[in-house]
């Protein structure tokens, strides 16, 4: 099994320019074409990294997520997208980092932890791959695990309307209203001396709490997007 390196390159000035340029274009497009509105930006920490945990109903959720925060965030992607060196450089500039398909979960988690320890926010879709419908599906515990290992809070985000704007299989974005609800930071302190069992229970409880809050935010966002 091929392992991924947990070492991440720093952010160069050209990368920052590319990221903010593309982010600005995408955000303006979504605001004009999809009448996208964002609520709850005041919930972002004033300093320090965090884990952005959005709902996932469309391929455009990734660029939409980049528009909710003013600074550069990092996104995990399948390493196949880096097979072309030029496209790979662009993805890296836009905040992406590769994880090998078939790699053990712990290696991907190490890569995510490296992002947080490097001081950068991380975007992690806790439902995994794109889902469909109005119900938030069971979450993977990766976000809770990373939060507990690094101390970075999880910020849940409900993205309403993205599935109508660009459903699975669509070739272009429809002018459907989108609404984004940013929730309050969520975390659980890891008490020194906790057993592995206690930490696992805390991780499961945090995941359950994030799931409940994601559903609440998603319901509000969908309603305000016209569902």
Image: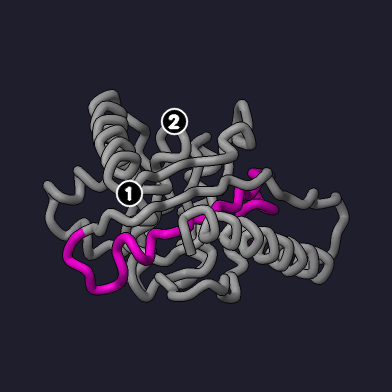
User: How packed is label 2: few (under 14 Cα within 10 Å), some, or many (20 or more)?
Assistant: few
Answer with mark 1 or mark 2, whichever residue precedes in sequence.
1
The residue closer to the viewer here, 22 or 2, is: 22
Distance of mark 1 from mark 2, alpha carbons? 20 Å
Q: Residue at x 38, y 56 (%)?
A: 61
Q: Where is residue 137 drawn, in percent x and y? A: 56, 75
Q: Residue at x 60, y 27 (%)?
A: 47
Name which quarter of the figure residue 78 lies in: bottom left
Q: Is residue 109 visible?
A: no
The residue closer to the viewer here, 163 or 151, is: 163
Q: Is residue 140 left or right of residue 77?
A: right
Q: Residue at x 30, y 33 (%)?
A: 24
Query: Magenta segment, which residues?
Result: 144-172
In this view, which residue lies farthest toward the front? 226
Rendered view: 201 above or below 42: below
The residue closer to the viewer here, 175 or 16, is: 175
Q: Is residue 224 visible?
A: yes
Which numbered mark, 1 or 2, is in the foreground of this view? 1
In the drawing, what numbered circle is on residue 134? none
Q: Dot 2: what SS? A: loop
Instruction: Give the residue number, with chain letter if any, for mark 1.
Output: 34
Q: Is residue 226 left or right of residue 94?
A: right
Q: Where is residue 195 drawn, in percent x and y? A: 84, 64
User: How packed is label 1: few (under 14 Cα within 10 Å), some, or many (20 or more)?
Assistant: many
Instruction: Give the residue number, with chain letter if any, for mark 2.
Output: 70
Q: Residue at x 30, y 36 (%)?
A: 28
Q: Where is residue 160 drawn, in percent x and y? A: 47, 58
Rendered view: 101 above or below 28: below
């Amino acid at each position: 099994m091929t392992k991924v390196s947990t070492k991440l390159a720093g952010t160069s000035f050209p990368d920052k320019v590319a990221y903010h340029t593309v982010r600005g274009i995408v955000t303006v497009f979504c605001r004009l074409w999809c009448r996208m509105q964002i609520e709850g930006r005041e919930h972002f920490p004033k300093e320090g990294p965090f884990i952005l945990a959005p709902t996932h109903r469309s391929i455009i959720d990734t660029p939409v997520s980049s528009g909710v925060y003013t600074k550069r965030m990092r996104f995990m992607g399948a390493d196949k997208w880096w097979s072309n060196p030029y496209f790979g450089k662009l993805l890296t500039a836009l905040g992406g980092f590769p994880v090998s398909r078939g790699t053990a979960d712990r290696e991907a988690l190490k890569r995510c932890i490296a992002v947080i320890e490097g001081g950068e926010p991380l975007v992690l879709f806790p439902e995994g791959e794109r889902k469909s419908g109005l119900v938030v599906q069971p979450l993977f515990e990766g976000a809770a695990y990373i939060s507990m290992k690094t101390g970075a809070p999880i910020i849940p985000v409900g993205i309403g309307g993205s599935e109508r704007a660009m459903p699975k299989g669509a070739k272009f974005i429809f002018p459907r209203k989108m609404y984004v609800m940013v929730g309050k930071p969520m975390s659980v302190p890891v008490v020194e001396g906790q057993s592995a069992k206690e930490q696992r229970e805390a991780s499961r409880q945090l995941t359950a709490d994030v799931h409940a809050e994601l559903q609440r935010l998603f319901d509000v966002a969908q309603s305000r997007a016209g569902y």
